[in-house]
Each structure stands twice: as structure tokens, then as C-alpha cells.
């Protein structure tokens, strides 16, 4: 008897990823699940602002046309979807997808699982009053120190609510802040019947999710070790996990696609945001990255095996975003000759003028793009005949007014500063709000994920 295989493809690695990827995965080869990851830490605060202005928003709106394009094929091929595109408003996202399905004549053929319970913004005062301090994991400060500035607060749920939705017949599962890895782990739990305390299989599915969570970053994109040899980046194949019931799996991609899946490309993704390699903590388990074994099984196929896991903790991580002042960044481009020295002099001039204004700025940061913006002081002195340098200068402050004043000081340098300014990119700098990140922990007993099934 042939060992069953479950195939999970990564169709989006972030909000703004390649719009062609989901269709190419669904139409280009065998697939059981399409996983799409849209959320980053700052994304939640952006979505919360959108929802505060319009209660029908607060999710990754890209997901609606993306699914609209592939829904008929999903139904025909019986491919299911897991995605955290719901952001802070999974229900509204689900309604938009359901409306799209009905418009395609798929009424009654699509069931959408909606997962909520991760958003605790409205519960913060009660939690703090009961002594749950939600301390910053990096500094130990209690959340009370910035409570009035909080914009969003979302718990990283794990795979099990998604498993519940799949068990209830969902063909599309839309979540809020579920871990990136949980979107891949959940289909494997559902299909293979893995138990919650089967820690090594939990870890294997988690690592499978970690490898593909950034989309093509493991299949030849952003590939430092071998990028010159990656073929046909213009039609790069997004990764597919082919998993078996024992927890071993392979990373591959559809035939006749560009990109490259090698031990090196998979390794680069493994160390992305890894943290402690022995204790990679998720809501579902603790995975030991030092136990991972990789093998180049064939061209564009890496076998992953030997993974060990340990019991999950009794805490969830919370992603909290809060308002932390304002910033603005502006640029000027200086041309040869003496481009770098002109940019340095322009930086001195603007700093002197800002100092004379007595602005309450928390920080002024200058980069010379083309010289040290990437490597900082390690870049050393530039070549004497460097043809052009971009002066990029930014400021931040707790109040908006001093930042606003800074934005008026850059343009005058075009005529009253060093010569040969060739570009004033974007005009006057724009004042932007600074959103800071506050990671915290909360007992799992405080969180009750909810699953609702709606029919298109």
C-alpha cells in the first residue's frame, strides 16, 4: 500500500507577496492545501486602525481577489485553504470571500471556517486589573506603562482551532493571529490524526510550516549562498511540503517552475527568525532545530527528517503594538565629483540648523546610501571618485511638531547647501506614526479560541 502524502503549498509569505503565486500553485501541479500567510507584527496595528475607521475592514483585502481567481479550481480539485488573512476582522474577511464565491456560482460548494478569540484589545484593562501584567518579554516592564498608547493586542493561537474548523468541514479556514507555522501544521494534524501530545510530530509539522512560511524565500528567492545560479527567477516556483504520517517530509516545488530548492536554500530559511535553536517555542510544541536532518533527495527536493519535539508551554505569546511617537525620513542625491563629501557637509549643515531651532528630537539618524547604509561603519571609507551618494536622514520624536518642522529643512539645501543635488525623492518628507512592538505572555487558560462555520 502506498504511504499517504499530504501536500501543502505556500501561496503567500507576507501581505504584498507575488499575486501570481496562489494561482500557479493551484493550477501547476498536485496540491491538497493552499496555505497563505499575510501577517507580521506591525500588520495587526495597521489593520486595527483600518477597522476603527470602517468596521467592515481590518483584514488583508488582497485575499479576496486572490481566492476569487482560484476558487473554481479549488472546488474542482478539492484543495482546501488555510490563511491568517482575517487579521483583526476574520468575520468580515469570510463574508467577503463568501460573497465572491456566490458571485462565481459556487454557492453551497464552499464552507468557510472563521477563527476568533485572539484579539484581546478590549480585554486589556480587565486583565491588568486581575494582575496579569503582560510584561514586555525583553525589558520586563508592565504593560501599564504604555497602556494608553496601545493600538492592538493579539494572541498567537496555534494549529488546533484550525484543525477544529477542518474537522467541521471547512474548505477555507480564515483566522486572525494564528502562528505562521500553525497554518501548515493544522492540515497535517487533521489528515493524519496526530495527537496533541505527539510532540515530535507536532515539531515536524511546525518546522515544515517554518520552512515554507515565507513563500519563495526557501525556493530560490532571497537566496544568499546560491543566488547567481538560481534559474528563471521571473517564474519562481513557490514551495510545497509533501508530508507523511510519520512526520518526515520533503520540500519541493511544481515541475517546470523556476527557482531552486536545495539543502542550502532550506537551511537559510530554517535560521530565519529562529531564536534559540534548541527551544523554538510555539503554542503547539517546543521544537529542537538541532535535531533536523536535511538531505538532497533529488533535484529541487530536500528531505527533512529526524525532528524531535517537547511539550508545549502553558503560555501564549501576545503581539502588542503601541504608539511611540513620530518620524520622518528624507533624501537628497549628490553627484560626482566629491559626492560623498558633499553629502557629509549637507548632513552637518542640517544638523546644525536643527540644533539652532532647539527641536525636541529623540534621535537623528543619517545614512549615506552607496557608502554605508548597509554595513554601517564596517563599510570603511568610500572610493574617492564614487559617482553618486544619497543622503538619507531621519528623525524621530515623541511629539509631532518637531518632526513636522524637520520636514521643512531638507528642501532648502538644494539651493543653499552643497552643489549637485540631482534628486529630491518624493518631495517634502512625510510625517509618520511610529508603531512599537511589545511582546508578552499570557496564560493559555485566559484564551478561548472560537470556531464558526459559514456557507457561501
Image (cartoon, rainbow, N blue to C red):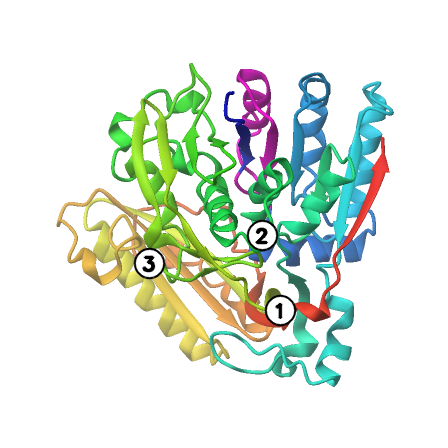
Q: Residue at x 38, y 51 (%)?
A: 332
Instruction: Report crowding for label 1: few under 14, some 14 to 19, many 20 or more residues within 10 A (C-alpha).
Output: many
Q: Give the mark nearer the N terminus: 2 vs 3.
A: 2
- For label 3, the SS is strand
How many angstroms separate mark 3 from mark 1 (CA)? Answer: 26 Å
Q: Residue at x 66, y 50 (%)?
A: 160
Instruction: Report crowding for label 2: few under 14, some 14 to 19, many 20 or more residues within 10 A (C-alpha).
Output: many
The magenta segment is 13-38
- For label 1, the SS is strand
Which disc number belongs to residue 322?
1
Q: Are marks 2 and 3 in contact (CB under 8 Å)?
A: no
Say if 338 sits above or below 32 in the image: below
Q: Give the mark nearer the N terminus: 3 vs 1.
A: 1
Please tell me which residue lies in front, 323 or 395: 323
How many angstroms separate mark 1 from mark 2 (CA)? Answer: 20 Å
Judge from the rendering whether residue 75 lies leftward or rightward of residue 307; answer left or right: right
Which mark lies nearer to you, 2 or 3?
2
Q: Give the mark nearer the N terminus: 1 vs 2.
A: 2
The percent coordinates of residue 349 (x first, y second) are 34, 67
Please tell me which residue lies in front, 177 or 249: 249
Quarter where residue 23 is shown: top right
| The C terminus sits in image quarter | top right
Q: Is residue 25 magenta?
A: yes
Q: Residue at x 60, y 42 (%)?
A: 189
Instruction: Report crowding for label 3: few under 14, some 14 to 19, many 20 or more residues within 10 A (C-alpha).
Output: many
Which mark lies nearer to you, 3 or 1?
1
Judge from the rendering whether residue 215 lies leftward or rightward of residue 455; answer left or right: left
What residue is shown with label 3?
367
What residue is shown with label 2?
179
How many angstroms separate mark 2 from mark 3 (CA)? Answer: 35 Å
Q: Residue at x 66, y 74 (%)?
A: 149
Q: Is residue 65 visible?
A: yes
Amino acid at each position: 500500500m502506498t504511504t499517504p502524502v499530504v501536500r501543502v503549498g505556500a501561496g503567500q509569505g507576507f501581505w504584498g507577496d507575488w499575486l501570481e503565486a496562489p494561482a500557479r500553485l493551484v493550477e501547476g501541479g498536485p496540491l491538497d492545501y493552499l496555505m497563505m500567510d499575510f501577517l507580521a507584527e506591525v500588520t495587526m496595528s495597521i489593520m486595527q486602525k483600518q477597522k476603527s475607521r470602517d468596521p467592515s475592514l481590518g483584514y488583508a483585502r488582497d485575499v479576496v481577489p486572490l481566492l476569487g481567481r482560484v476558487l473554481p479550481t479549488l472546488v474542482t480539485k478539492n484543495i482546501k485553504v488555510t490563511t491568517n488573512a482575517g487579521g483583526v476582522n476574520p468575520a468580515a474577511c469570510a463574508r467577503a470571500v463568501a460573497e465572491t464565491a456566490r458571485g462565481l456560482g459556487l454557492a453551497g460548494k464552499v464552507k468557510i471556517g472563521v477563527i476568533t478569540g485572539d484579539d484581546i484589545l478590549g480585554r486589556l484593562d480587565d486583565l491588568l486589573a486581575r494582575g496579569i501584567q503582560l510584561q514586555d518579554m525583553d525589558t520586563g516592564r508592565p504593560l501599564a506603562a504604555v497602556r494608553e498608547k496601545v493600538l492592538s493586542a493579539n494572541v498567537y493561537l496555534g494549529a488546533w482551532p484550525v484543525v477544529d474548523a477542518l474537522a467541521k468541514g471547512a474548505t477555507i479556514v480564515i483566522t486572525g493571529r494564528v502562528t505562521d507555522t500553525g497554518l501548515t501544521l493544522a492540515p497535517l494534524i487533521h489528515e493524519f490524526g496526530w495527537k496533541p501530545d505527539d510532540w515530535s510530530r507536532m515539531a515536524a509539522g511546525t518546522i515544515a510550516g517554518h520552512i515554507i512560511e515565507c513563500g519563495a524565500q526557501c525556493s530560490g528567492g532571497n537566496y544568499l549562498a546560491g543566488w547567481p545560479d538560481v534559474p528563471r527567477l521571473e517564474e519562481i516556483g513557490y514551495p510545497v511540503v509533501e508530508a507523511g504520517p510519520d512526520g518526515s517530509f520533503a520540500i519541493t516545488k511544481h515541475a517546470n517552475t523556476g527557482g531552486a530548492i536545495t539543502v542550502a536554500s532550506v537551511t537559510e530559511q530554517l535560521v530565519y527568525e529562529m531564536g534559540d535553536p534548541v527551544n523554538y517555542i510555539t503554542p503547539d510544541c517546543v521544537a529542537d532545530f538541532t535535531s533536523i536532518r536535511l538531505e538532497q533527495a533529488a533535484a529541487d527536493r530536500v528531505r527533512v527528517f529526524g525532528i524531535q519535539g517537547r511539550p508545549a508551554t502553558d503560555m501564549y505569546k501576545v503581539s502588542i503594538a503601541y504608539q511611540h511617537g513620530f518620524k520622518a525620513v528624507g533624501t537628497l542625491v549628490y553627484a560626482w565629483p566629491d559626492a560623498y563629501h558633499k553629502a557629509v557637509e549637507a548632513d552637518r549643515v542640517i544638523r546644525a540648523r536643527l540644533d539652532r531651532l532647539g527641536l525636541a528630537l529623540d534621535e537623528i539618524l543619517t545614512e549615506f546610501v552607496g557608502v554605508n547604509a548597509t554595513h554601517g561603519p564596517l563599510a570603511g571609507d568610500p572610493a574617492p571618485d564614487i559617482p553618486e551618494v544619497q543622503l538619507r536622514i531621519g528623525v524621530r520624536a515623541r511629539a509631532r511638531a518637531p518632526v513636522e518642522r524637520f520636514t521643512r529643512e531638507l528642501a532648502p539645501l538644494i539651493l543653499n547647501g552643497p552643489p549637485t543635488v540631482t534628486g529630491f525623492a518624493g518631495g517634502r518628507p512625510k510625517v509618520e506614526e511610529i508603531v512599537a512592538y511589545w511582546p508578552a505572555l499570557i496564560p493559555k487558560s485566559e484564551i478561548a479560541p472560537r470556531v464558526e462555520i459559514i456557507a457561501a
